[in-house]
Image: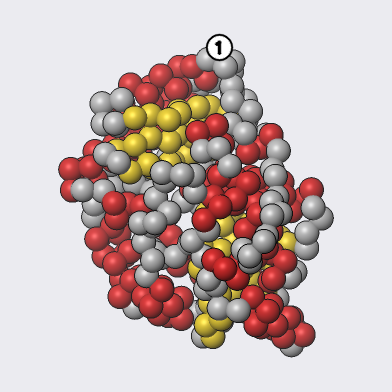
Amino acid sequence: MELRTDPEEFRRACEEARAGGARVGLVPTMGALHEGHLTLIGEARKRAPFVAVTLFVNPTQFAPGEDFARYPRTLERDSAACEAAGASVLFAPEVSTMYPPGEETRVHPGATAAPLCGAHRPGHFEGVATVVTKLFALAGPCVAVFGRKDYQQLMVIRRLVRDLLLPVEVVGIPTVRESDGLALSSRNTYLSPEDRRRAAEIPHALAEAARAFEAGERRAGTLVARVRARLARISDRIDYIDVAEPESLRVLGAEEHAGERALLALALRVGTTRLIDNLVLGEDSAPRVGDASPGPASASASAEARRV
């Protein structure tokens, strides 16, 4: 596997792969890789013989006071994990190369970025849209693989590709979860043992809502109330728990009824750690919940990704 830090060298690597007849698969990440990231790389390998992984902690998607400075940076371990997973090239640029001195251009997303996390993290999706557009410009025509845990991000990027006529196929992969159902996230490493135990209640709440939906419950307010009642006991702050249309992300009012598919999305803090999760009701399987403690997928799978 090649390691590239210069944008033009990364661009040339992708161009040379296409010139040789290979399709390019792209997996953008911020590093601190876990089993979810490795699943994305595996999916990209199914779709393209040349897989490019990018590792960049993007400063423009962090608001003041967020965790940009302490976000885990584990380049050596991530590089080894990418190589073991079959990546062809790892692009790990410096901030100064992605945002050169004097730069001033941003990609401003529209209504899809406004609700949910967009309402609680102003400027976040503008930063995401800007850096992803840069990565697409460098990689060129490709198939880009993202996780559905960041569902709103996925929809913003799909909208971006359609609106800007970019030669990119965007693929969303189901959320990878730990043995007790908690969604894998690089930020899970922030959780204390007690916070981690509390966080395990999140998939239980999603599963309860999924069962209600399958039983015929469609009133948005009722579905939200079920989840909120369960998570209010374990969270230190709830940013939002909403039911929304799965494509436009328009949040449904409490008295509105969902259709055959509906996005149930949430963001909350356990201790000082902000966690997000979601389920597309009527489409996604409910999380498989186990013991209220991290099992092998937490303690070993993500650790293994770092030890490779």
Tell me the element at label 1.
Answer: loop
Q: Quadrant of the C terminus?
A: bottom left
Q: Nearer the viewer, residue 271 or 176?
A: 271
Q: Are there few (<14), some (14-19), or many (20+) residues within 10 Å of tag 1?
A: few
Residue 94, given in percent of the width and then of the height, sits at: 53, 71
Residue 124, given in percent of the width and then of the height, sits at: 55, 44
Residue 191, given in percent of the width and then of the height, sits at: 26, 48
Give the labeled residue for mark 1. Answer: 255
Q: Is residue 109 visible?
A: yes
Specify the quadrant of the image occupied by residue 102: bottom right
Q: Is residue 170 visible?
A: no
Q: Is residue 50 left or right of residue 286?
A: right
User: How many numbered circles are shown?
Assistant: 1
Q: Nearer the viewer, residue 171 or 286?
A: 171
Residue depicted at 24% across the width and 45% down the height: 196
Q: Is residue 204 left or right of residue 109?
A: left
Residue depicted at 73% across the width and 81% down the height: 15
Query: Amino acid type of disc 1?
Result: Glu
Residue 144, given in percent of the width and then of the height, sits at: 64, 63
Specify the quadrant of the image occupied by residue 28: bottom right
- The colour style of the image is secondary structure
Q: Is residue 192 left or right of residue 137?
A: left
Q: Nearer the viewer, residue 34 or 116?
A: 116
